[in-house]
């Protein structure tokens, strides 16, 4: 069963192989567990054949995401992959150029990283970059600037 199908069954994001990797990296790099963070998706249902979401689907769901973020009021937001980073930063720039930076947006501080499914496909180099991004998020959480 693919990760997204498993998400549909359990009603939670990132519960398949990519979720296991994400949990491991959050634990190892941030010293946190899933129940200490809030995880959500840009769109609220899986696109057919697990394809990338279309722009109109993102637009239809964007208010749900922004409402969730306003309600949760996170200190730090870590986006996973292109779609979340591009939506929250209002840009078309890709994740490779966006990551390694911290952005101060209306909703808080944001640091983008790769989607864990991409990290699974991309191997140790991508996982190492994702680790660095999560370590940056931990530093930001521990910063007195917040």
Image (spheres, grey):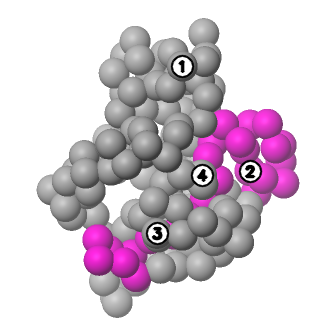
**What element does badge 1 sit on?**
helix
Give SS at disc 3: loop
Q: Nearer the viewer, residue 61 or 102?
A: 61
Q: Give neighbour class at mark 2: few <14, some 14-19, many 20+ (Cα, 10 Å).
A: many
Q: Position of residue 60 (x, y in %)?
A: 33, 42
Residue ID at (26%, 56%):
66
Mark 2: which secondary structure?
helix
CA neighbours of label 4 inside 10 A, class few (<14), some (14 to 19), many (20+):
many
Magenta region includes residue 114: yes
Whether residue 55 sits left or right of residue 95 in the image: it is left
Of the residues tagged 2 and 4, which is closer to the observer? 4
Kindly identify which numbered label has been placed on residue 48.
1
Question: Could you tell me which quadrant the C terminus lies in?
Answer: bottom left
Mark sitting on residue 81: 4
Instruction: Calculate the distance from the C-alpha at mark 2 to the C-alpha at mark 3.
Output: 25 Å
- The mark found on residue 127 in the picture is 2
Residue in view at x 60 percent, y 66 percent: 92
Task: Look at mark 3 in the image and give the residue it sits on.
Answer: 90
User: What residue span does the magenta drawing correspond to?
Assistant: 104-128
How far apart in space, not on screen, are marks 1 and 2 (Cα)?
Answer: 27 Å
Query: Seen from this angle, which residue lies furthest bottom?
Result: 145
């Amino acid at each position: 069963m693919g990760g997204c199908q498993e998400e549909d069954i359990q009603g939670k994001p990132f519960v398949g192989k990519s979720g296991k990797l994400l949990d491991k990296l959050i634990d190892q790099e941030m010293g946190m567990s899933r129940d200490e963070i809030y995880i959500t998706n840009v769109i609220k249902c899986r696109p057919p054949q697990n394809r990338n979401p279309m722009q109109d689907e993102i637009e239809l769901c964007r208010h749900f995401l922004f409402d969730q973020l306003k309600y949760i009021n996170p200190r730090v937001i870590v986006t996973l992959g292109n779609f979340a980073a591009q939506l929250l930063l209002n840009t078309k720039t890709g994740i490779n150029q966006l990551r390694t930076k911290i952005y101060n947006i209306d909703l808080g501080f944001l640091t983008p990283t790769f989607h864990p499914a991409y990290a699974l496909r991309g191997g140790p180099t991508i996982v190492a970059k994702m680790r660095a991004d999560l370590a940056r998020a931990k530093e930001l959480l521990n910063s007195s600037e917040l």
